[in-house]
Each structure stands twice: as C-alpha cells, then as structure tokens.
Image (tube, rainbow, N blue to C red):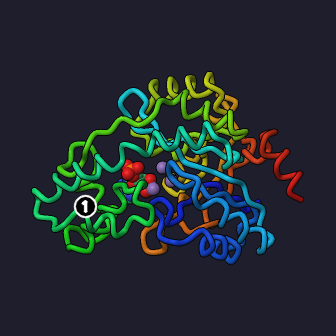
C-alpha cells in the first residue's frame, strides 16, 4: 500500500495548496493520503474534497508541537474529526505563542544583519498564526545567508545557534488526549529527529503509550535505513503500529516527494490497521 500519512500545505510551512498536494499525491501513485499541517486544521476540507474527486483515500490529520523534558517532540493525529471543539481550542492555544516567538527570532536574526526578518517571514507564511522556523529559513536563503534551508537550520535555527529561540509547546499527554477525544490515532512523528536517544527515548515511548499513543513513524522522510530498522524494532517492542510518511513540505526543499518513501519493513503492523482508522476507511468505500 502506497500510504503517505504526513505532509504539509501552505496552511503551515509547506508551499503547495491542499488541492495541489492532492493532485501531486495522486500523480505519484499514493493510495492512502493524510494532510498533517502543524497545529491547525484549516487545509483539511480542501484536501478531502480534492482527494475524493481524484478517488484517493484520505485521512484527516494534524501534527501537534509538544515539549517533553525540554525537547520538542511532534505528535501526529490521524483520523481526527476536524470539527471537534476541544481539539480546535487546544490547537488555538498551541498556536498562540508563535507570533511572539517570531518577533523574538526576528530580533535575533536582525542582529546578524537579516533585513526585515519578521515582515519577510510573514510574507512566506500562508497562515500568519502559523509562522515558524521554515518561513525564516526561506528568508535567510533569499538573502544569501546559506545555500538551502537545511543549511540555515544547521547554522542558525537549532538550539545553540544564534537565531534559535526557546519555546514551550503543549504537554505530551495533552496532545494525545486531544487526538483521542477527536477520534484519532496518535503517532510519534519522525522519532529519529527528536534528538533523544537510548533510555530517554524508551521513557518517551512508555509515557506516550501510557497516555494512549498507539503508533510511531517507522518510515519518514527524515529516517535513513538504520533508523527504519531501529524504529521497526522499537515499534515491535512497544506494541506500536507503524506509520509511513514523507513529511513533504516543498518540491525544492524536501528530500522525499509524496508517496516516494521506502516501504514499511516486514514484521510491523501498519497504522492503517488500527481500529479507529480501519473503521473510517471502511465507511469511506
Ligand atoms: P517550528 O514548528 O516553527 O519550530 O518549525 C519546525 C519545522 O522546521 C519542522 O516541521 C520542519 O519543517 C522544519 N525543520 C526543523 N528542522 C529542520 C532541518 N534540520 N532542516 C530542514 N527543516 C527543518
Ligand atoms: Mn514543518
Ligand atoms: Mn515534524
Ligand atoms: Mn511534519
């Protein structure tokens, strides 16, 4: 099954509209697709209607920003009801700190000489309440600070670099609770990118499972072969379903296009077998 269960539109830090993503997913042979914008649900109605006209099975999704023991962790919700009030209110609270953080990032970057950092980042942000590091990264590339966004992140926008601003997102158990209340399955996104390893990672997975989390991304655009092996073993150890995703953001930026990730390895249970998703997909066909 060519499933791609994590990607971004211009409603967060992707560059394509939900309609353009649906067309690209279909053209790339995706058979089961989810849109998972950061901390908002605004693109889902457009994504679902275009997926449906293309005959592409679609799952409503979101990627929630979490702070766990001082590290940022992303939790994807799949099969959530976009009309669920408590989820909407929760995401509003997660978004509320982004603007102030952007102002502080702009201040730090202007000290380095970046011109009109805030206004320029806002020009890239399709959704002003979702301004984030990727929008600043595109500004720094435009102004010649680095050759591409990944170099900007490495040199400017990660902890310890001059444009990084600490931020407190929501709690792990809170994000999982919103997802479960809205009828979804909670998935730890790209665990290989969490900058957490060994015993800490097992602690994170244990807390996530205790909160009701059911899956982790085993295949992700930011996992290499060895991470796929590590996380498929951990998925089996913890009894998690395995998700497959590109985390696609933009044609010129993302290493893996929609639907072009490696297949899930043998021996893991695909997340689309989770009862909440199976039920929704059965009702859709
Ligand atoms: P934010 O939520 O504003 O902190 O931005 C997080 C986003 O930055 C992620 O969802 C990615 O799109 C992007 N990002 C984080 N680290 C990197 C990296 N090393 N290279 C490219 N993009 C990154
Ligand atoms: Mn992103
Ligand atoms: Mn992420
Ligand atoms: Mn993502």
What percent of the width, then of the height, locates residue 110?
14, 59
Q: Picture quarter containing residue 268?
A: top right
Label 1: element kind: helix
Side of 200 relative to 232 (left or right): left
Q: Residue at x 65, y 55 (%)?
A: 5
Side of 135 relative to 200 (left or right): left
What percent of the width, then of the height, locates residue 224?
50, 53
Quadrant of the image for the N terminus?
bottom right
Q: Picture quarter containing residue 13?
A: bottom left
Q: Residue at x 21, y 43 (%)?
A: 160
Q: Is residue 30 above or below residue 81?
A: below
Residue 93 versus residue 281: which sits nearer the camera?
93
Q: Is residue 271 above or below residue 107?
A: above
User: Is the shortest distance between ligand 1 and the CB of mark 1 under 8 Å?
Assistant: no
* Disc 1: which residue: 118
Quadrant of the image for the C terminus?
bottom right
Q: Picture quarter containing residue 88?
A: top right
Q: Residue at x 29, y 47 (%)?
A: 101
Residue 150 versus residue 70: which sits nearer the camera?
70
Side of 174 relative to 143 (left or right): right
What percent of the width, then of the height, locates residue 114?
16, 65
Q: Is residue 49 above or below residue 267?
A: below
Question: Can residue 255 be seen in this snapshot?
Answer: no
Question: Can residue 165 be seen in this snapshot?
Answer: yes
Q: Residue at x 16, y 53 (%)?
A: 107
Q: Quadrant of ligand 2?
A: bottom left
Residue 176 versus residue 207: which sits nearer the camera?
176
């Amino acid at each position: 099954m060519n499933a791609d269960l994590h990607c971004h539109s211009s409603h967060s830090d992707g560059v394509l509209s939900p309609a353009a993503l649906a067309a690209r997913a279909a053209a790339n042979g995706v058979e089961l697709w989810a849109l998972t914008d950061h901390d908002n649900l605004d693109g889902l109605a457009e994504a679902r209607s275009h997926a449906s006209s293309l005959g592409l099975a679609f799952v409503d999704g979101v990627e929630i920003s979490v702070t766990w023991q001082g590290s940022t962790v992303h939790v994807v919700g799949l099969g959530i009801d976009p009309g669920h009030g408590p989820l909407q209110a929760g995401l509003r609270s997660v978004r509320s700190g982004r603007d102030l953080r952007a102002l502080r990032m702009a201040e730090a970057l202007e000290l380095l000489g970046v011109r009109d950092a805030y206004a320029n980042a806002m020009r890239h942000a399709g959704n002003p309440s979702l301004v984030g590091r990727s929008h600043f990264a595109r500004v720094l590339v435009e102004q010649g600070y680095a050759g591409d966004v990944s170099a900007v992140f490495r040199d400017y926008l990660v902890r310890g670099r001059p444009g990084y601003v600490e931020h407190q997102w929501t709690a792990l158990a809170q994000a999982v609770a919103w997802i479960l209340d809205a009828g979804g399955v909670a998935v730890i996104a790209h665990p290989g990118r969490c900058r957490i390893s060994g015993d800490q990672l097992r602690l994170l997975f244990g807390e996530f499972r205790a909160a009701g989390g059911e899956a982790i991304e085993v295949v992700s655009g930011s996992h290499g072969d060895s991470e796929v092996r590590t996380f498929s073993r951990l998925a089996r150890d913890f009894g998690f379903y395995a998700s497959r995703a590109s985390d696609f953001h933009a044609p010129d930026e993302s290493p893996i296009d929609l639907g072009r990730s490696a297949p899930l390895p043998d021996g893991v249970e695909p997340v689309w077998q989770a009862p909440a998703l199976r039920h929704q997909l059965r009702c859709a066909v």
